[in-house]
Structure formats: C-alpha cells, structure tokens
Amino acid sequence: MSLVLDAGAFIALERNDRALWRRVDDAHLDGSPPLTHGGIVAQVWRGGSGRQSRLAKALLGTIVVPLDHGLGRRAGVLLARAGRSDAIDAALVALCRPGDQIVTSDRDDLAALADAARLRVDFIPA
C-alpha cells in the first residue's frame, strides 16, 4: 500500500498540517515513501524559497514518477473511460494500485477516475 499525494496534499503539508505530516512520517517508517508524479509538482512548486520550505522538504521525501509516455497513455485511456478532462488527476489515479491511499482535496474527481479504472483505493482528506 502506498500513500499517494495530490496537489491538495502538498498544499496541506506546506501549511504545516500536523496530522498529514504524521501520516507521511509513518509511510517513511513503514518503508514506503509517499508517491506522486511530475505534473502534481508543477501544480504546487513556485521556487521553493520562503513559505515553500515545507513543500521542498515534503518533495525530498516523495517518490516523484515522471509523467512520461506510458503514464500519459494510461491517463488518457482513463480519461476516456471516465468522461473527464483533467490529465493530471487521471495520471495520479493511473499510478495507484489497489489498496493505496490518496490524500486529496478533490475526492469527487479522483473517485470518479478510480471508479472508471475499477480501482479500490481509500481517500484521505487533505
């Protein structure tokens, strides 16, 4: 099981959400660092200085998967199945395996994509 982080999760970490920081720390202790993809990083990264120092710390401990040809194709197929248009969200769901936990502030859109993928995941509010 992996902890999968969307943009809302990183924003919560940047705002120093203690409960989410504990969840991230627990994932590291379990030997399974959080996971995201490069498109999510683009949504939240603005240079890393000042107020983004917590975000920079969170990203250092996160596996960031490239949004490459393969992931892009899987996301595109998922978008077609779900009748959705957000490629960044679709790529996040395409990264997931059954039983993963997605930390998100956008549960409805991600749940629709997970349903289209016939993927059982848990959603944790960010």
Image (spheres, helix red, strand yellow):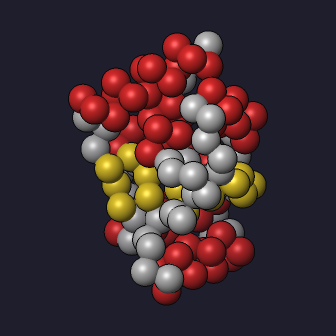
Front-lying residue, 38 or 98: 98
User: Is 91 placed above or below 45 here?
Assistant: above
Quadrant containing the C terminus is bottom right
Residue pictured at 49% horizontal, 86% vertical = 29
Residue pictured at 71% horizontal, 74% vertical = 19
User: Is 7 placed above or below 16 here?
Assistant: above
Quarter of the image holding residue 117?
A: top right
Residue pictured at 63% horizontal, 79% vertical = 22
User: Is 126 placed above or below 30 here?
Assistant: above
Where is residue 124? Give x, y as percent: 72, 57
Residue 85 falls left or right of residue 55: right
User: Is 104 placed above or below 109 here?
Assistant: below
Residue 55 falls left or right of residue 17: left
Front-lying residue, 112 or 107: 112
Number of dots carrying numbers: 0
Residue 37 in view:
yes
Where is residue 57? Give x, y as percent: 42, 71
Q: Residue farthest to the left?
A: 69
Quadrant containing the N terminus is bottom right
Residue pictured at 43% horizontal, 80% vertical = 31
Where is residue 44? Give x, y as percent: 47, 46
Q: Residue farthest to the bottom?
A: 29
Front-lying residue, 40 or 29: 29
Residue 53 in view:
no
